[in-house]
Amino acid sequence: MAGSLNKVLLIGRLGADPEIKQMVNGKSVARLSLATSNTWKDKNTGEKKEKTEWHRIVIFNEGLVNIVQQYVKKGAQVYIEGELTTRKWKDEKSGIDKYSTEVVLQGFNSSFKILSSKNNQTENLQTSPSEKSSLPNDENIPSNDLDDEIPF
């Protein structure tokens, strides 16, 4: 279908430490449980209300998996961009087909930003075929200063 888009943007907090597992092909995958919350004031009672949604996040990008494993812990606030995917699996005990809807980060259309971590630093990580996933440092932060070496 032309003109369709599958893009999920979330800002939330991790409800547990990331779960890192090895796949059959030897690559690692990270699974996160992300909470997003809405708060509002009840018009009738004036009481503050809150509703929390839980999201399953799956990261297949090997570089991001390593960063998540090292720097992301329960309670960290993160920003993610990914794709909504529903997968079918069979419950081993009952033999019944089950479905899980997850936000998947893989490929060039995904990004992951740590808004607050265990050491309260902000880190921006993007995935793309030409971009290496790494922690930012002074060497790879682009400068906004104009340079005299512009060839025109």
Image (spheres, rainbow, N blue to C red):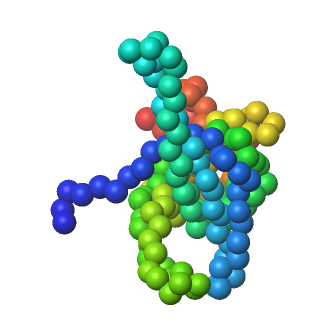
Task: Specify whether residue 124 is in view.
Answer: no
Which residue appears at 79% of the width and 40% of the height?
118
Q: Is residue 26 left or right of residue 108?
A: right
Q: Is residue 138 left or right of residue 94?
A: right
Give the number of callouts. Answer: 0
Which residue appears at 44% of the width and 14% of the height?
45
Q: Position of residue 69 (x, y in %)?
A: 75, 58
Residue 113 sits in which quadrant?
top right
Residue that sits furthest to the front in the current view: 45
Query: Of 30 and 141, which appears nearest the observer?
Result: 30
Residue that sits furthest to the left in the current view: 2
Residue 24 sits in which quadrant?
bottom right
Q: Position of residue 108 (x, y in %)?
A: 47, 60
Q: Position of residue 99 (x, y in %)?
A: 44, 71
Image vertical order of residue 151 relative to residue 148, above or below = below
Task: Specify whether residue 142 is in view.
Answer: yes
Q: Is residue 142 left or right of residue 19?
A: left
Q: Quadrant of the C terminus?
A: top left
Image vertical order of residue 122 relative to residue 43, above or below = below
Query: Of 143 and 137, which appears nearest the observer?
Result: 137
Query: Of 53 and 128, which appears nearest the observer?
Result: 53
Which residue appears at 39% of the width and 14% of the height?
44
Which residue appears at 63% of the width and 41% of the height?
13
Q: Quadrant of the N terminus?
A: bottom left
